[in-house]
Amino acid sequence: MEDFQSAYQEEKARLDRTLDTIDKELNRLRGIPMYTGHDYTEQVLEAGRDTQRRQLAQSGQEPYFGRLDFEEQGGTRTPLYIGKVGVGGDTAQPMVIDWRAPVASLFYSFTGGDSASYEAPEGLIEGLVYLKRNIVIRKQILERVVDTFNSEEEGPAVSDEFLLYRLGENKDNKLRDIVSTIQAEQDQIIRAGRNSALIIQGVAGSGKTTVALHRLAYLLYQYKEQISAEKMIIFAPNRMFINYISEVLPELGVGDIQQNTFSDWASKVLGLDEAPSDGPEALTEWFDHTVKSRLDDSELPGRFKGSLLFRDQLDRFVEQLESACLPEEDFMPWDGAKLPLRTIREWYEQEYKPYPIARRKDRVLARIHRWVEMELKKSPSAAALKERKSKASQREKAYAKKWPDLSPLALYKAFMGVKKMQGLKFEDIVAEIPKSILKMTQANLKKNVIKEEDLPALLYLFTRVDEIDGNLRFDHVVIDEAQDFSPFQIAVLDRFCKGHSFTILGDLSQGIHYYKGIREWAEMQVLFKPDETAYFALTRSYRSTMEIITFANDILRHGVGTDLLAVPVFRSAEPVRIIQAAGAERLSTIRKALDRIQDGPYRTAALLTRNLGDAQQLHAELSGLGYELNLIDGRKSEYEGGISVLPVYLSKGLEFDAVIVTDVDEDHYGERDAKLLYVGSTRALHELWLLAGETLPAYVTANDPEIAVTVWPEK
Ligand SMILES: Nc1ncnc2c1ncn2[C@@H]1O[C@H](COP(=O)(O)OP(=O)(O)OP(=O)(O)O)[C@@H](O)[C@H]1O
């Protein structure tokens, strides 16, 4: 107790000193009149002061969250205070060190032991850690001081006490930063070098999304000279998810990073009027549990059109295109004048060879135009000039039309046999496309309907025949829920991305979009050379209680059939409740469970149904009974918190303090839908209820009363 008191007093005094220094510095900066003139040097200085003012104002509320006492070899014990932004960065001993600075990595990577080291620009720095302390400051008030390592005390190396305190809290509506409790295995990913494609397999709740966002903040800090926020992008599954994660980057002081769905981004690049996407109707079709037979992988359009085989077919098509583009004829602007095919061919095949085909076409046509202008100058009279000019203009237009239309859609239509293209013979390639997929695509393209699954091919054709403009290129690409991406999508993105700088994260066990996603990470790894890629596995799960994770692990083991199990953090609460709620009892049981949850200390909860129709119906019934609920149906772009009703497949990526899954029976969640139940169950932080139908799915067990029970709570 005494120790705690003295630690608290010590930190209180230090906080007062820090706040005082920040206050003085802020006042000094605010006292400098804002520069609004035209002098460039002054403008740069003013921008710097503005950033400093904003950062200091932020630090002035919660300057730091951790302290690490470190003694560098040959040096002395020094307390390092670590915060979201550095304060006094130019001095030899800054008051607060930015969490992304090399030395701050010790705060995260240190797991006990006699010595510690970190990578600095000047090499490996070694030394001793004496103390690791978590400090909670809210609005300038010191709220909590917890030592998670103290070399002078007996006890476990680095304790989880502070992490558990953080995980036990109820969550706001939005995902939050975790700078104060980043774990060593997460820190390794956050600080991994920029020029490789990281592939991260992480169990549900292992912090993948959160880690990716922190990694972006780190990369921007570490490589500030080489990369910029506007050239980084996060691909997320839908608009609502983007809204859900939207607070983390601003909390980390990072703005302007693009956040988009693949479909929206691709449509913009391709100039499509509308972004094709798996709308609610398409999803309902894929996720309907009453559809008993599922197509083989090779017949699933998304799987086929996302494969590298399909990319290779397009490659063969483009190769032919190169030689077939040039019209096999001389150009005659008017009778008696001739630009021989031989010359045009030389321009196209030799002089402009370094350019992509579409650029070559433009250059050849422009050069022909220039040649015509020169020839026109030789006209014998004004009348002849006029006549020749008009003829040449018509013939130039006619000649240009003999070149193929090289827009991605026109090429794709040609490839799929919906549009004629002279001089190409690729029937053998098309014959390799599964018949059902070819027929369906042809029918769609005839009506000018483009599906989401066609986007990689369209983008690929674009990048193969044309130049990618500099402002479309990325310094870094993050792909969340990457198990739902196809290898071809990644291959296309690689063409837009400098140095294979990717963070690709997902969870194969949550691969519920079976009709388009991958089955193995190897499908993506083959895209990169071994030294261009690194693989990480996150197995610790931070979101849910130990009971929920142990229960969900059983679904993985017996239902999904994988050994990628989650390791819980030891945070214990109520067992999972599996309650009979079939037939006439269904609605009243849902209500009873909901009432209990509403009486609890929670901020967010979710009712997860098997499909959209169920969610709509339940939402209508319960709203009619006076419950305040938000329906999430795939159309919404904002996540509102409170109690949500949604089909289970739309819950991916989200989390709620308490979750009720309805209709958990063999019919709704047969073995092939075990992944859906896994996703649903792992959305819960503190409480999970499964409302059971007549027969529980065989893979759902309630053998251990510490983990799952089939009775109502006693009080
Ligand atoms: N080191 C940590 N400290 C505190 N909280 C953490 C930590 N890592 C993850 N969390 C919390 O765990 C929860 C899950 O994180 P996140 O959503 O990023 O995981 P995920 O792996 O993307 O999950 P899923 O695949 O299930 O959607 C979040 O509430 C996050 O704040």
Image (cartoon, rainbow, N blue to C red):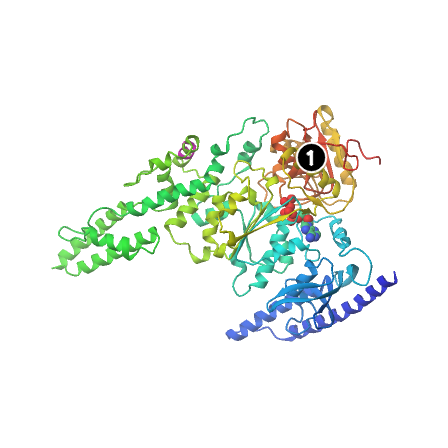
Q: Residues within 10 Å of mark 1 (few under 14, many from 20)?
A: many
Horizontal side of 327 relative to 92 (left or right) equals left
Horizontal side of 6 relative to 244 (left or right) equals right
User: What is the quadrant of the C terminus in the image?
Assistant: top right
Q: How many marks?
A: 1
Residue 339 position in % (x across, y down):
19, 53
Observer-nearest of 429 and 136 = 429
Question: What secondary structure predominates along the stretch shown in magenta?
Answer: helix
Query: Does the magenta-highlighted stretch encompass residue 440?
Result: yes
User: What is the quadrant of the N terminus in the image?
Assistant: bottom right
Query: For the point 76% across and 39% down, which residue is it?
Result: 597
Amino acid type at circle 1 is Val
Q: Which residue is mark 1?
A: 661
Name the outermost residue toward the right.
2
Image height of 433 relative to 329, above or below = above
Question: Residues in magenta?
Answer: 439-443
